[in-house]
Image (cartoon, rainbow, N blue to C red):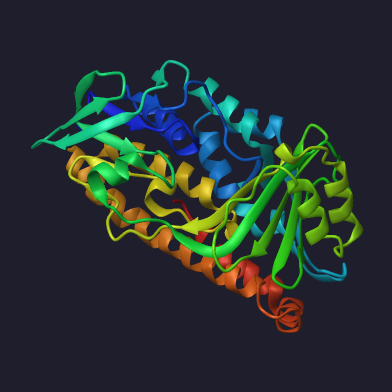
Amino acid sequence: MAKAQRILIVGGGIAGLAAAIALRRRGFAPELVEQSASWRALGAGIALQPNAMQVLRTLDVGADIEKAGAPLRRFNYSSQGGDLLCEIDLVGLWSRMGSGGVGIDRGKLQKALVQAADGARCRLGVGLTSLRQRKSFVSVGFSDGTTADYELVIGADGIGSTVRALAVSDAKPRYCGQMAWRSLAPLRAEFEDEVQFWLGDGCFFATYSVGGGRTYGSGYIAEASPRREPIEGRLARLRKRFASFPCPVRTFLEALERDDQIHCSAVEELHLPEWRSGRVLLIGDAAHASSPMMGQGGCMAIEDAAVLAELLESSDSVDAALDAYARRRRPRVDWVQAQSDALGRGALLPAAVRDAVLRQQGAQQFEARYAPLLSTP
């Protein structure tokens, strides 16, 4: 086991909490800091695919997540007019993983992860002000005026990572050409175990159940440049943009009641040549944010956490573990990012071209895209 008595995790989202759980399961005692003053889940819903659920089951939190969410067994692509383009059997595709994926409210996911991380030292309302590398440790300054030394600092603080800016890279996320409009509606999905995509010209809409009689919906709209969407009038603008889509989309939007139920953000990605500087390592979106087209952002973060904990336990030193981590994770993450890019471009092709390809090859392409993720991370 690597000698790492003092490990700091920065960020209390999916990546940070998964890292805290995984490290504690391997015999480490990490400390976690989160700059928000309370546990607060950003966004609306998330699909945890079987590669992530397999990891979560090993961390003894999978059953709680399955209970709180809804199973996802099929995936459908349809045209803007409602014609089915292709259908994928997710259970068959992921059969070796033991189960399908789960759609879940992000708030419920965070609650399950926080409960599973119980016992880890967590400080809320605390951010970072400085990181100073030493030979075998990192000196950290915190926003509450305290300082401490750590043998390893894990930056799990998302796409706008402070840890990345202070210690690893000044690279900025790249805009992917789409704005995302995400929301949860108090609506029971017509087919509760399906992920449904409706593809239009320059836009598309996706829905799936997150359990508890609620449905997650996300509209993606091509925009030349990112822009701030005022809260006032969001719902009316979203309904207008997708007014020509099939009844399930319109029904979802009619179930929403307020502008503030809709979260708007630019779709961004981040490619870094290195995820590490000395004893500072980035994981999750802080290291390799990608567009959501493969639905693997949170899944990759969960895998990152588990692999890092495993390697710290099995390696003779922290440095050896971090070297092995990069070798093991890079090919898988690069694949997901490349496939997400390709999917994002393909979804916005002229409808006649895109729909013809999906009718002829959609299911086969889908299975080939996810095949590398069937192996152990």
Q: Is residue 191 visible?
A: no
Viewer-nearest residue: 24 or 115: 115
Q: Where is residue 239 in the image (x, y as percent from the top left)?
A: 82, 54
Is 233 left, or right, of 13 in this rendering?
A: right
Judge whether 217 appears above or below 260 on screen.
below
Q: Where is residue 199 in the image (x, y as percent from the top left)?
A: 75, 68
Q: Where is residue 19 in the image (x, y as percent from the top left)?
A: 41, 34
Question: Quick one: which residue is furthest to the left in this view?
Answer: 135
Question: What number of labels is visible?
Answer: 0
Q: Residue at x 20, y 40 (%)?
A: 279
Residue 333 figure quarter:
bottom left
Q: Position of residue 125 (x, y in %)?
A: 42, 21
Judge whether 143 appears above or below 258 on screen.
above
Is 226 left, or right, of 188 in this rendering?
A: left
Q: Residue at x 68, y 51 (%)?
A: 181
Viewer-nearest residue: 262 or 45: 262
Viewer-nearest residue: 106 or 264: 264
Viewer-nearest residue: 303 or 195: 195
Q: Quadrant of the N terminus?
A: top left
Q: Is residue 257 visible?
A: yes
Q: Residue at x 30, y 28 (%)?
A: 8
